[in-house]
Image (tube, grey):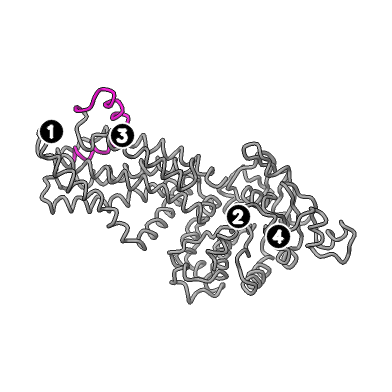
Amino acid sequence: MEDVLLKAKNLKKSYNGFEALKGITFEVKKGEIFGLLGTNGAGKTTTIKIIAGIVSASSGEVFINGKSIKENPIKIKSQIGYVPQDISIIPNLSAFENLMLVGKLYGVSKDRVISMLKAINLWDRKDSLVQTFSGGMIRKLEIAMALLHEPKLLLLDEPSVGLDPSAKLNIWDFLKSEKQSMATLITTHDMNEAERICDRIAIMKKGQIIAQGSLEELKDAINDKNANLEDIFIKLTGESLDEDTQDLKSIRKTRDVIKRLS
Amino acid sequence: MWFLAFIRGSLVILEIEIRKMMRQRMDIFTRAMQPLIWILLFGNVFKNIKSIPIKGDYLSFMTPGILAQSVMFVSFFYGISLIWDKDQGQITRFLSAPIPHSSITTGKALFSGVRSLVQAFLIVLFSKALNINIYINVYTIILSIVVIILSGVCFAGFSMLIASLFKTVEKFMGIVQIITMPIFFSSSALYPISLMPNWLRVVALLNPLTYSVEALRSLFYQNNPNIFEPVLVLSFYSIIFLVFSAFSIRKLVS
């Protein structure tokens, strides 16, 4: 039997009568990177926030390692690493302080913090304030914060927004090198990112998953072996992922992240 | 397990806030200016009004009131940090950590108490330099630390409740500006309750600032350590505000 670490079953979420999620179901296995691909407003961030225990689902269930997150949220959360889309580091504290304080929330030892800083090549900058770091270093530090307690499930919400191409490649290589020990769920609206690092992809539109599978399976779904992910996405959703299809709030949020990383 | 996670979470959040404060030390001194101006300007005028029915001099009577007011103002405006932390993504990270949500608001409220202590220390120091007659001894110091931390927790809890309900800096500032002045003037900070009309006395008795003022006045002005009743009322308000703010913190990110 395959090692299913995350199972989302018929998740629904409504905000003041608006249905942000209309019953989505998917699984993520250990060693796998699973991508949620969709435009802003498709329900990706809502999905990841429900799984991270930040907001509650209106109905449906999330199982992590076979256990419902409703049973013992504190224990379940200790198995999850989460990187929010917003920059969540504290800019006027040092890299060491940021990592050490998050480590304390998870009961992680100081030795582990030191080895993590060395692993991400930030040991030499451990005492520098994070506000002096480049965007790539900040994102790497945030991913390190999420991996510090060796989670079974890693959740990444748009991790490469605002990064330059070389910093993106760096982050993708890092994620691929770490993926075997856990299940990874990533939300993105970057076709290149989804195609390069995701083993399987779910395409979301208006709170629903309209297709999911490996890239090859998605090609089969539209009967076009030569299609790339962008072709598949446009054919299945009738939408593109350009900024001009996004609402004002989403554009502002994305630009804010870009501004803070640059 | 829940209780241990609560303690751990509260202490880590407290440590984060203290570390942030240590990087912005100037802020502590600039915020201490306002109460000093109250004592210097307002106090020196009001001390000449003979009809205020108090024993002793007015500045000694007023200083504990200004101390409590200062704790209230600092703690009330501290709720804005919850919105800033939300905008910076830190609240989502805390909410995803294996700690109860109540530990986020409790840790922040405790910090507001600790932060108020620094402010109180500066005001007491200034009062002594101005030769204002307030009682300083071991028990007034120890008990006033308890009252100041408790008052900070109480008003920060109230403030975080407002922040989590109104979510934006603009709305938060509007609400806080509307309610802080009535809370201040309907308390016994500047004048005794006996001077108030009956309806205002009822408001004063429901006002947590009155209990903060009365406890500090009992210690610094009357040298009387019997502050059980105001401490009990402040504890009650603190628990209520912390419980409600813990429940509503999720609204910030939903």
Task: Give the mark toward the camera: 2 or 3.
Answer: 3
Q: Nearer the viewer, mark 1 or mark 3?
A: 1
> Is B204 a magenta residue?
yes
Give the Cα separation between the discs numbered 2 and 3: 40 Å
Give amino acid for label 3. Answer: Leu
In magenta, the rendered stretch is B194-219
Q: Looking at the figure, which quarter contains the C terminus of chain A? A: bottom right
Asked which quadrant contains residue A119, the reply is bottom right
Q: Let me know if marks 2 and 4 both belong to one chain.
A: yes
Q: Residues within 10 Å of mark 1 (few under 14, many from 20)?
A: few
The residue shown at (73%, 43%) is A23
Question: How far apart are the two marked residues, 1 and 3, measured between alpha carbons?
Answer: 25 Å
The residue pinned by badge 3 equals B232
Which numbered disc, 2 or 4, marks the residue closer to the eye?
4
Dot 2 falls on which chain? A
Q: Which residue is mark 1?
A: B54
Give a yes or no on whether discs 4 and 3 share a subunit.
Answer: no
Q: Main secondary structure of the magenta part?
A: helix
Q: Position of residue A217 (x, y in %)?
A: 84, 59
Q: CA distance from mark 2 to mark 4?
A: 35 Å
**Image mark 4: chain:** A
> What residue sits right under mark 4 in the picture?
A242
At which x and y percent is residue A29?
Answer: 73, 57
Number of the front mark, 4 or 1: 4
Question: What is the chain identity of the residue bearing mark 3?
Answer: B
Q: Which residue is mark 2?
A: A79
Residue A78 vs A91, above or below: the answer is above
Specify the label residue B247 is tagged with.
none
| Name of the residue lying farthest toward the top | B198
The one nearer the camera, B83 or A141, is B83
The quadrant of the image that shows the N terminus of chain A is bottom right
